[in-house]
Image (tube, rainbow, N blue to C red):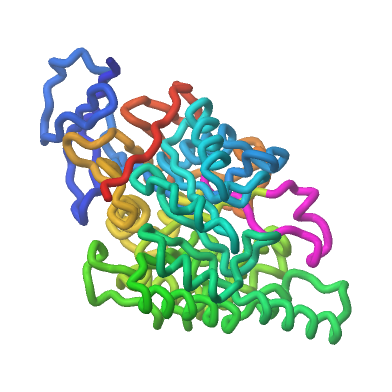
Amino acid sequence: MSKFLIKQATIINENEKFVSDLLIENDIISKIETTIDNNYNAVEINAEGLYLVPGAIDDQVHFREPGLTHKGEIYTEAKAAVAGGITSYMEMPNTNPQAVSIEELNKKYERAAQCSLANYSFFMGTTNQNLEEIKKVDFKNVCGLKIFMGSSTGDMLVDNQQTLETIFGNVNALIATHCEFDPLVKKRQQEIIEEYGEDIDATFHPIIRNEEVCYQSSKLAVDLAKKYNTRLHILHISTAKELALFTNKIPLKEKKITSEACIHHLWFSDEDYKTKGNFIKWNPAVKTLYDRDHILQAVIDGRIDVIATDHAPHTIEEKSQSYLKAPSGGPLVQHAIQAMWDLHFQGKISAEMIVQKMSHNVADLFQIKNRGYIREGYFADLVLINPDKKFTVTKSNILYKCGWSPFENHTFPVTIDKTFVNGELMYDNGEFKSTKIGKRLVFER
């Protein structure tokens, strides 16, 4: 049984910051006290000057397995996540084959049980035809149902109004949506091509996938959720206009309609397309400084409930194609916490709020059992952050299989010092100390 005694850490948890000792026994936080004598034969860690926070829970990643493993794998991307302090993730169904049946969904769980260093769950996917399969899902063991109401291919784009009505009216589970109105995207793209030709660059991305593209689709999802009293979670909000669809007037645990902000929409703006081009091409698009700043304010005031990554790696070769051919998405799990702490050191968000939005609220929103907090009896998913050690992102320290990051050459003000997953010291100052597999997330619903 592994035992660790973390001494004199500055714990950030449940809107408090205090210096304390913490004892890990096996996979559980067994004791939190001002001083704990080491009578437990535990490995002692001097954490004086370090911040101890609960591991982040990322509710939106694309780890590319099965079928797209030239971009990423469950093993490689979960490993990068752990190095970044993300100890649990929820992965999306648009793999190959797509996770739109019980059989394919179970295959992903079986694969993660073999190789994922982080804790895991997988969304069931939706098509215009798979309602009967959806009805078979046990959502006490599956994080939720994903609907692409835009920006997908094949039959995972659910754009039939009657199908949407049927799903929202019949599925008793959390429905997570990607909201962009595809007919308007196609119309705007054709207009741009007719005016400028096909040799356009990424600066047109937020013009094609503009504010109205997002708002129309998000409003449709909210209207459907209100009509059927559905539990709706809208992913990666990218515009200030969409914020009017959400409230901060009621506690998170009472909300039926929640939302997420992603790292790239909190960090980049349309000004960055000039230098980073397709490497910050995401769907929904990174938009204006005005949108970026208002999204951050909504995170702080509670209209937006959680922060995630939408980690979606593509190869350098794929992203280096012309704008119209280059796929959307980018890798983020290794540097998400550092990016938010960078914003903290810029005076834009408190450390307590970062922990709330990346750990506490994700656990509460998805009703995850015994994770997301530093509490006695909870799983020891923990991260030690060094605020006095800077970290520069370089090719040599990027762990993503795709081998690149939109943060390359940026220096963050903090370093992820250690990451514990279920009480195992998985990552320690740049080195992986364990290959023990993470656990499947369980939901108290």
Q: How many marks?
A: 0
User: What residue lies at 59% left-to-right and 63% top-to-bottom?
Assistant: 128
Magenta span has 315? yes
Give the residue displayed 67% in from the left and 63% down from the top.
Answer: 281
Task: Report the magenta residues as a range.
Answer: 314-334
Q: Quadrant location of residue 148?
A: bottom right
Q: 140 or 258: which is nearer to us? A: 140
* Residue 106 seen anywhere in this rendered image of the structure: yes
Q: Is residue 339 left or right of residue 27?
A: right
Residue at image point 31% right, 50% down: 363
Q: Residue furthest top?
A: 41
Q: Is residue 443 left or right of residue 273?
A: left
Residue furthest front as drawn = 132
Is residue 328 found left or right of 375 in the rendered image? Answer: right
Where in the figure is residue 49, as x and y percent of width and height?
28, 39
Q: Does 72 appear in magenta? A: no
Q: Which corner quadrant of the image does residue 30 belong to? A: top left
Q: Is residue 119 above or below residue 347?
A: above
Pick the residue in front: 68 or 172. 172
> Magenta span: helix, strand or loop, mainly?
loop
Residue at 51% x, 31% y: name it.
110
In what quadrant of the picture does the N terminus appear? top left
Can residue 413 be seen here? The reply is no
Measured as percent of width and height from the top left, residue 187 is found at: 73, 82
> Would you place residue 244 above or below residue 158 in this image?
below
Q: Position of residue 111 (x, y in %)?
A: 54, 31
Give percent across and percent down for residue 426. Answer: 42, 27
